[in-house]
Image (cartoon, rainbow, N blue to C red):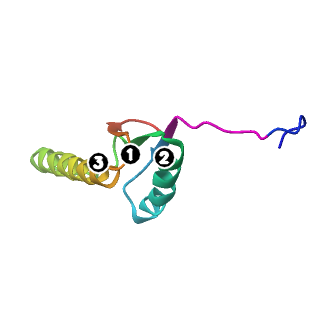
Amino acid sequence: MNLAGTKTRICIKNILYATDFSPAARMALPYVLGLAQRYSARVHALHVRHPSPYRIVGPEAMVQMMETLEEQVKLECVSMHEMLAGVPHEVLSTEGEI
């Protein structure tokens, strides 16, 4: 109740779910889903890859390593879409500084 004696309500329209696709980040997902369902909110799942966490490798190996990393992120995004299927959502993945 607020000072006037009436109940205060909150309205949540958007939820940012920042993830690195780790098991620890996935543990937050039930809470995100619960809030989204309770408030009919849209979930914005965001994964940001750091631009250069790569080991020093030759040019021929770098191409393969980058392709493998991109494929892994795509699979994680598909999995995230499946986990968020019950609520309005979008899954975004980008590269850059956090």
Relative side of 6 to 91, left or right: right
Of mark 3 and mark 1, the one earlier in the sequence is 3
Mark number, residue 87: 1
Residue 25 in magenta? Answer: no
Q: What residue does disc 2 label?
A: 36
Tag 2, which secondary structure?
Answer: helix
Most frequent secondary structure within the magenta stretch: loop
Marks 2 and 1: CB-CB under 8 Å?
yes
Of mark 2 and mark 3, the one earlier in the sequence is 2
Question: What amino acid does circle 3 point to?
Answer: His
Residue 9 in magenta? Answer: yes
Marks 3 and 1: CB-CB under 8 Å?
no
- Which corner quadrant of the image does residue 96 belong to? top left
Q: What residue does disc 3 label?
A: 81
Relative side of 65 to 28, left or right: left
Q: Nearer the viewer, mark 2 or mark 3?
A: 2
Q: Which quarter of the figure is the N terminus placed in? A: top right
Question: What amino acid does circle 1 point to?
Answer: Val
Sort mark 1 into few (<14), some (14-19) or many (20+) by Cα contacts within 10 Å.
some
Span highlighted in magenta in the image? 7-15
Residue name at image x 25 percent, y 49 percent = 73
Tag 1, which secondary structure?
Answer: loop
* Number of disc labels: 3
**Observer-nearest of 69 and 84:** 84
Tag 3, which secondary structure?
Answer: helix
Query: Marks 3 and 1, how far apart in space?
Result: 10 Å
Indicate the position of residue 71 as horizontal and vertical percent values: 17, 49
Question: What amino acid does circle 2 point to?
Answer: Ala
- Return the residue found at the far front: 6
